[in-house]
Amino acid sequence: FQMETLLRGALDRGEFELHYQPLIRLRDGTVMGFEALLRWNSPQLGRVSPSAFIPMAEERGMIGLIGYWVLEEALRQVRHWRESRWPELYVSVNVAAVQFESELFASQVVNLLGQQRLPGSALKLELTERSLISAVASSAAQLTALRQLGVLIALDDFGTGYSSLSALQELPVDVLKIDRSFLQQLDSQGGAFIEAMVTLAQSLNIFVIVEGIETQQQCDVVQHLGCHVGQGYFFARPQPASLAEELCQVGW
Ligand code: G
Ligand code: G
Ligand code: MN
Ligand code: NA
């Protein structure tokens, strides 16, 4: 109850911040983009994990405003990065099911891109199977509209839902983000699953990103399995924009 009250005022009090984690092309260490990850610094509760407050924000009708702020802030940041240093960079934003269910979502994205004078290709949206499936009616039309602008659509946490394959078959996506749980089981069967997902993605012309790379060895293995882009603590943790940027100057 207390968390809900505090969450309601958090946006107005400026308690949200975005952290950024680089998405690295494994072949040469190039930073392709950054995933934006929401952080809530509450004076009363401390740092609250998004896994704790996002579901509450979804249930209590607060995710629309919070999600809008996330998109606005992430696009402002990527515009700055593109102008100052990385002209091709994109930012990857997580989208909650409820946000995507709104039929206004696509037009909001279009307006925000316009405000920053950014092409669609500066943005990737990370959707989960749940968000796509719970919004099947509005999904296909919105996805099509966004993709026509060049916005990339990623299926996040891929492989963990109960209907990963049918989601992939029914909805047009550009990128699969293979869930980090597969990397954590590399010694047993995780490698075989990653390899199969990469093969499937390649035959569908879908791009693969592997999440949760924590060691050099995992990095080598996923590269060997045919993955092109990776993300994980091995490269960098999610960090405030200025720090994330500095880390990337160093390169890998
Ligand atoms: O960054 P961290 O591992 O604490 O994130 C936990 C979860 O919260 C992840 O599943 C991540 O996708 C989700 N998350 C982080 N930022 C956002 C956001 O801005 N919007 C939504 N909908 N989910 C987010
Ligand atoms: O659900 P989603 O994939 O959006 O979740 C992203 C979350 O994964 C981020 O909150 C981030 O903190 C976390 N994360 C990123 N890289 C790693 C990693 O290498 N290991 C682990 N355990 N978590 C990671
Ligand atoms: Mn994500
Ligand atoms: Na994920």
Image: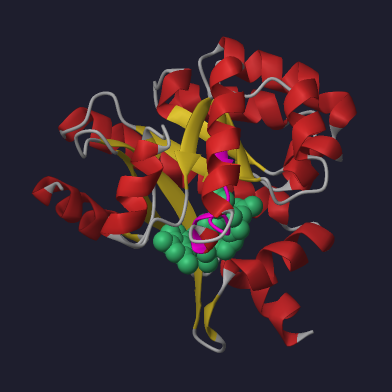
Q: Residue furthest top?
A: 148
Image: magenta residue range: 176-184
Confirm whether residue 38 shows in the render. no
Q: Residue furthest left?
A: 250
Horizontal and vertical percent for residue 154? 58, 33
Count of picture labels: 0
Task: Indicate whether 5 appears above or below 167.
Answer: below
- Queried whether the magenta region covers residue 177, the answer comes back as yes
Q: State left or right for residue 142 relative to residue 229.
A: right
Identify the residue at horizontal 54%, vertical 42% (top origin): 194
Q: Residue furthest bottom?
A: 44
Horizontal and vertical percent for residue 236? 29, 59
Identify the residue at horizontal 75%, vertical 39% (top origin): 164
Q: Quadrant of residue 196?
A: top right
Identify the residue at horizontal 48%, vertical 20% (top origin): 120
- Queried whether the magenta region covers residue 183, the answer comes back as yes
Confirm whether residue 121 shows in the render. yes
Task: Indicate whether 126 appears above or below 53.
Answer: above
Horizontal and vertical percent for residue 126? 59, 40
The residue closer to the viewer here, 38 or 69, is: 38
For the N terminus, which image quadrant? bottom right
Q: Specify the color scheme.
A: secondary structure
The residue closer to the viewer here, 120 or 237, is: 237
Q: State left or right for residue 232 relative to residue 147.
A: left
The residue closer to the viewer here, 181 or 41, is: 181
Horizontal and vertical percent for residue 223? 35, 39
